[in-house]
């Protein structure tokens, strides 16, 4: 699957997870600060809240559940951070990715679909009705956003004529894809929130289910699940940069700095958006996904295809 | 404590410096359990939690502090006991009996949490107790294949031994958990002693996903099956009865029944409440679900004896024209609204609502925040997404009458309409004191709460306007009566929203209409 010219930058195997962890923490801290501000508390103090929570989880005793499929449960939980790390392997920072695969877009999509299985197992394996329903909700959410999401990715790939993420970033020398295909960008952002079950798409771990798929994991298990979720959001934000925002292109600063800055901006936008609206009910979102988002992004793909055939891109 | 003493303590107790440090930097995560009559305490605890920048737990798996608010002596206690059993060390448990002691009790819990050697000893005692139970019951040590990882607080112990037993204890705790579906006690368990309960829980053939198979609900679950008709499998909480498919660990498959689309699906029996975040105190909703769709529902109310119950949202509002009373009503509405927003998955808006509630109740610094609250109220009122989520949910037609045991009574006007309409009424109550163009009561003098005698007896001398408590009692009576039919056929998300949009005040119900509170 890896072509001869698929350069693999092994040094990044250390750097990329570290960067991803930093962004994931920033997402958690930003979200805690946002809620603290809403409740009238000083936002600065909340920046350390995720670290304090993590400390408590490390100390906490882990529990087992009767009838739980412990192996599948733990595999499901572990797959969340694993999928996030695997997804960023193909995301270039300043033009260099760890593995700039010829099918990078498909790889990214596959990692996200891995999460479907992972979240289902995490919910089902716990042998609890809350986890089970949380797992269901993640799947129905996936069924609602996945096709629009795939067509949003496809639209960017069509615009560049390549499935290689590096090529897609390079194809935006003249004009960023966000200007050519704004609908695809919006759909991508919506699905980025949904794939990482981030508010307002956090019903799989919703308060109304006592935490849903996250109701039963305790201690280190819980830490892995929550950290993985934040990492997935960070990975999705980072991927938006080469797909729609010109990759590392920008004045003055080096390419890697622009990539990181743009990713941080997208992440900040996603975290901020999460606090502005109530949760989207999954039973109602299915309709929106299929009746609104899918036709919208298909029209977008059609328009971009016409541009490409006409030689305008 | 100086470092040398710490180090000495480390050597004797086996608590590492890292564990100690983690405990110090960790944030306390309280799980609130509110009994009927505990509203005042709940509000105080929620205020303390907010002021300290803490977050409340949603489930026992993430909680380290169990805070019981209000009087003991109802079924809520037993639910709290089971939740306590599900919490792993380090853990602490306190009861808050009055609003003034909320802060002190939470401090107490924090101190207990930081005492790691004591936590260690408590964990060992729990393990030993389970070991004794194991021998007595001579239950074969079934192993569900679970692995327990090294725990930070546990270096250098006889790990294998401890783990075996811990695992077992955890499993028992979880079986308790799963019987009632976590934190969600079932009223029919009240009569069982603990030993009795555990014996039943060990019986093979309880539970499945989501743990219905309620070992205590003898009778009840069978009755349900008979009513439902068409089930092939028994719930199998009785060893001899069950002929369902047996799974590893002695569990059986769920029974099955036709769903709304005519498919045969698993039926689970679960209960929501009384220990549940953002849930009316004392309410237990027993549900038969397929997937997450509710087939049948029944409501139970867990109240302590009436003498113990004080109605918080009550006497101040006897004269509705008084600005302080309006403000108090607005605080009650803000409380309901913030809980609703939390259930609707809008934690930031809920946080501001909670701040507003506290501001309305204790008016120091009252002039600050008006802009914030006005903006917040406007955003909630105009949220298209919220309206879209609530559209057509939980409708109650106007003009209905409900049949009581002796007489029928009309459904209170505040219940009419769908969930959005009911939420809109809370918003109106708040706007009445918040919006500059209506009145300036947001800046009104502090509320002076004066307690009147127990109102249950002296209703003949009622003031010209009905007391807020009585109004809320009639509202709660109708809500509880209508609830089962409203939630049947709905998804769990809708069930939570419907209940939150009703938010029945069982405290008022217990005091003003005691006969209705024990249906």
Image (cartoon, coloured by chain):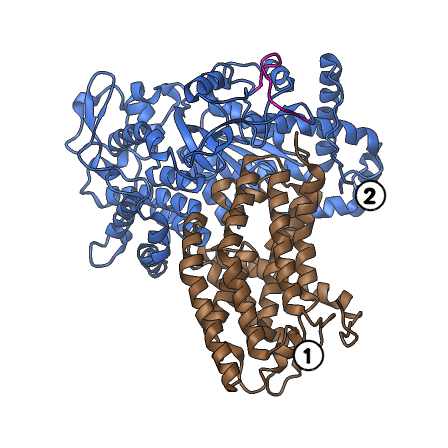
Q: Colour of chain B?
A: blue
Picture residue at 54% right of the left edge, 49% below the top: A138
Residue B515 numbered mark, or none: none
Q: Colour of chain A?
A: brown
* The C terminus of chain B - image quarter: top left
Magenta-colored span: B236-247
> Which residue reaches farthest left?
B464
Residue B25 visible somewhere in the drawing: no
At which x and y percent is residue A17? 72, 63
Mark 2 neighbour class, 10 Å CA radius: few under 14, some 14 to 19, many 20 or more: some
Whether residue A237 sits left or right of residue B361 in the image: it is: right
Whether residue B429 sits left or right of residue B178 in the image: it is: left
At which x and y percent is residue A206? 50, 46
Query: On the image, numbered disc 2 is attached to which residue?
Result: B7
Picture residue at 43% right of the left edge, 49% below the top: A281
Residue B259 visible somewhere in the drawing: yes
Picture residue at 25% right of the left edge, 49% below the top: B428
Q: Quadrant of residue A20?
A: bottom right
- The majority secondary structure of the magenta stretch comes to loop
At which x and y percent is residue B267? 50, 29
Query: On the image, numbered disc 1 is attached to which residue?
Result: A95
Name the residue nearer the viewer: B175 or B463. B175
């Amino acid at each position: 699957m890896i072509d001869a010219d698929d350069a693999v930058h092994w040094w990044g195997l250390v750097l990329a997870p570290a960067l991803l962890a930093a962004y994931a923490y920033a997402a958690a801290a930003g979200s805690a600060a946002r809620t603290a501000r809403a409740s009238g508390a000083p936002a600065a103090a909340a920046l350390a809240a995720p670290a304090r929570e993590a400390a408590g989880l490390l100390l906490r005793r882990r529990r087992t559940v009767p009838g739980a499929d412990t192996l599948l449960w733990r595999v499901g939980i572990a797959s969340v951070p694993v999928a996030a790390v695997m997804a960023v392997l193909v995301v270039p920072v300043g033009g260099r990715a760890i593995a700039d695969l010829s099918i990078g877009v498909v790889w990214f999509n596959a990692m996200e679909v891995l999460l479907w299985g992972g979240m289902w197992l995490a919910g089902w394996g716990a042998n609890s009705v809350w986890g089970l329903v949380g797992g269901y909700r993640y799947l129905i959410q996936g069924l609602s956003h996945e096709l629009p999401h795939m067509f949003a990715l496809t639209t960017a790939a069509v615009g560049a004529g390549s499935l290689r993420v590096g090529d897609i970033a390079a194809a935006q020398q003249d004009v960023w894809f966000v200007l050519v295909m704004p609908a695809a960008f919006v759909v991508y952002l919506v699905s980025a929130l949904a794939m990482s079950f981030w508010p307002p798409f956090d019903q799989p771990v919703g308060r109304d289910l006592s935490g849903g798929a996250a109701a039963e994991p305790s201690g280190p298990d819980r830490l892995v699940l929550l950290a993985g979720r934040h990492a997935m959001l960070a990975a999705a934000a980072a991927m938006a940069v080469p797909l729609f925002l010109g990759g590392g292109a920008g004045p003055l600063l080096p390419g890697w700095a622009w990539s990181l800055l743009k990713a941080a901006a997208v992440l900040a936008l996603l975290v901020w958006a999460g606090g502005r609206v109530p949760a989207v009910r999954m039973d109602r979102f299915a309709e929106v996904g299929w009746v609104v988002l899918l036709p919208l992004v298909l029209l977008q793909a059609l328009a971009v295809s016409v541009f490409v055939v006409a030689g305008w891109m | 404590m100086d470092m040398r003493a710490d180090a000495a303590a480390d050597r004797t107790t086996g608590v590492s410096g890292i564990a100690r440090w983690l405990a110090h930097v960790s944030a306390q995560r309280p799980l609130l359990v509110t009994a009927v009559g505990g509203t005042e305490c709940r509000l105080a605890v929620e205020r303390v939690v907010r002021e300290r920048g803490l977050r409340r737990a949603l489930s026992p798996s993430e909680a380290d502090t169990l805070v019981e608010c209000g009087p003991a002596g109802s079924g809520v206690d037993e639910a709290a006991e089971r939740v306590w059993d599900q919490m792993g060390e380090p853990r602490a448990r306190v009861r808050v009996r009055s609003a003034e002691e909320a802060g002190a009790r939470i401090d107490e819990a924090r101190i207990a949490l930081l005492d790691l050697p004591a936590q260690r000893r408590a964990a060992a005692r729990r393990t030993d107790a389970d070991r004794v139970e194991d021998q007595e019951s001579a239950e074969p040590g079934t192993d569900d294949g679970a692995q327990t990882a090294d725990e930070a607080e546990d270096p250098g112990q006889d790990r294998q031994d401890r783990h075996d037993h811990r695992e077992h204890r955890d499993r028992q705790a979880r079986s308790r958990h799963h019987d009632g579906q976590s934190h969600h006690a079932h009223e029919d368990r009240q009569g069982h002693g603990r030993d009795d309960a555990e014996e039943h829980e060990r019986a093979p053939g309880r539970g499945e996903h989501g743990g219905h198979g309620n070992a205590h609900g003898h009778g009840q679950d069978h009755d349900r099956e008979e009513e439902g008709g068409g089930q092939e499998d028994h719930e199998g909480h009785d060893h001899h009865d069950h002929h369902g498919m047996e799974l590893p660990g002695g569990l059986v498959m769920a029974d099955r029944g036709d769903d709304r689309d005519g498919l045969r699906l698993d039926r689970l029996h679960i209960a929501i409440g009384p220990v549940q975040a953002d849930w009316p105190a004392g309410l237990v909703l027993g549900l038969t679900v397929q997937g997450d769709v509710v087939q049948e529902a029944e409501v139970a109310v867990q109240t302590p004896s009436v003498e113990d119950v004080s109605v918080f949202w009550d006497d101040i509002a006897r004269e509705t024209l008084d600005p302080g009373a309006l403000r108090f009503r607005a605080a009650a509405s803000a409380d309901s609204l913030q809980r609703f927003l939390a259930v609707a998955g809008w934690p930031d808006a809920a946080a501001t609502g909670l701040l507003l509630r506290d501001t309305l109740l204790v008016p120091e610094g009252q002039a600050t925040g008006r802009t914030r609250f006005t903006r917040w109220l406007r955003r909630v009122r105009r949220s298209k997404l919220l309206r879209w989520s609530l559209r057509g949910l939980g409708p109650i037609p106007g003009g209905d009458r409900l049949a009581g045991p002796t007489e029928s009574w009309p459904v209170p006007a505040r219940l009419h309409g769908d969930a959005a309409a009911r939420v809109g009424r809370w918003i109106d109550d708040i706007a009445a004191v918040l919006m500059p163009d209506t009145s300036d009561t947001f800046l009104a003098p502090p509320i002076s709460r004066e307690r009147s005698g127990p109102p249950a007896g002296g209703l003949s001398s009622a003031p010209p306007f009905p007391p807020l408590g009585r109004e809320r009692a009639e509202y709660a009576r109708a809500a509880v009566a209508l609830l089962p039919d409203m939630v049947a056929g709905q998804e769990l998300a809708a069930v939570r929203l419907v209940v939150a949009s009703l938010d029945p005040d069982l405290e008022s119900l217990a005091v003003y209409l005691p006969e209705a509170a024990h249906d």
